[in-house]
Amino acid sequence: MIGKKDYGLYFVETVSKKQRVSTVKAAPFDPAEVTARFSASGRAAGFRVEHYGEINGFPLIALTKRATGLRPRIYLSAGMHGDEPAPPLTLLALLEAGFFDDRATWFICPVLNPTGLVRGTRENANGLDLNRDFLDVRAKETRAHIGWLQRQPPFHLTLCIHEDWESTGYYLYELNPYQRPSLADHILAAVHEYCPIDEAPVIDGRTTAAPGIIRPIDDPLLRETWPEAIYLRAHHTTISYTLESPSAFPLEKRITAHRAAITSATMRLIHDLSKKSAYLPPSQP
Ligand SMILES: [Zn+2]
């Protein structure tokens, strides 16, 4: 058991995500302040900052920056679960470090669930898990998010950034229906420099394809509830990763691990697509 002090400033207790009731377990996180920093730093870095909706007085924002020429279109999302602060803080650190340059066209939804983040709960203030809401949409946040996604061009890569309260190390889900070159090994090799990989044969109830890698064994579109990644795979992207850092590790370590994963995935994709024969923009599904 990891002691309280190891959670840094952000955590006071842990509970299982399988609990049915929303339980406060991460605090304090000020989504209004983090959103304002994304807006200011984004504008300073040449991003367009869109308010695509609002929830309980919190703006829902998206940042886009289009590079000229043939560049991959990369989408990143964070803050879907309010008890997972590392993903939005990772994107903010990358933004403020100037990572999102003209090597790609960037699409970023950094704080998807502000009412969950302000309460420190996985679900939003109405008790809805937004990452199970993409087939039969119930939440206002999801409706606004999908509306924004439908106005964007197709993506070459999507990264949904999360944390897991039960894992013993970093892992990822890969959705690669068109058999594009996998980025999974590159991502995990980069992460492994900073954080252990979860080597359990079964993670989150799913048998792994390789250590730290989960691939669907049946058609994910047949699932009864859709997370964001399955919606993206169905309508918006050719390859998708959900990146999961272990919540039991200190916050700084999780942020470093996510930074390594995102850097590795995006740079590898840009490298692969720069070989002209491999550069086939995705068709609109
Ligand atoms: Zn999550």
Image (cartoon, grey):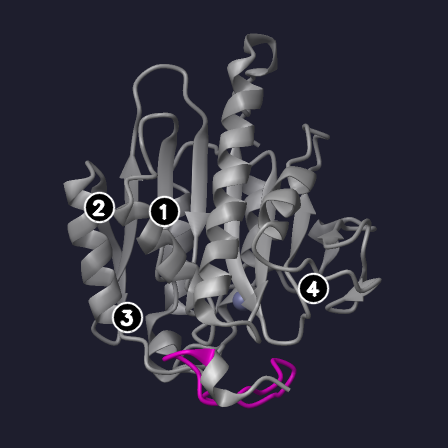
Residue 247 image-quadrant placement: bottom right
Q: Which residue is mark 4?
A: 224
Q: Is residue 260 above or below residue 36?
A: above
Query: Is residue 77 in view from this perspective?
Result: yes
Q: Are marks 2 and 3 in contact (CB under 8 Å)?
A: no
Query: Is residue 151 in view from this perspective?
Result: no
Q: Which residue is mark 1?
A: 108
Q: Position of residue 106 (x, y in %)?
A: 36, 36
In the image, what residue type sits under mark 3?
Answer: Pro
Q: Which residue is mark 2?
A: 42
Q: Are marks 3 and 1 in contact (CB under 8 Å)?
A: no
Q: Bounds of the magenta span?
A: 7-25
Element at label 4:
loop
- At 60% from the left and 15% from the top, the residue drawn is 278
Q: Are marks 1 and 2 in contact (CB under 8 Å)?
A: yes
Element at label 2:
helix
Q: Which residue is mark 3?
A: 31
Instruction: Determine if the magenta segment contains residue 19.
Output: yes
In the image, what residue type sits under mark 4?
Answer: Glu
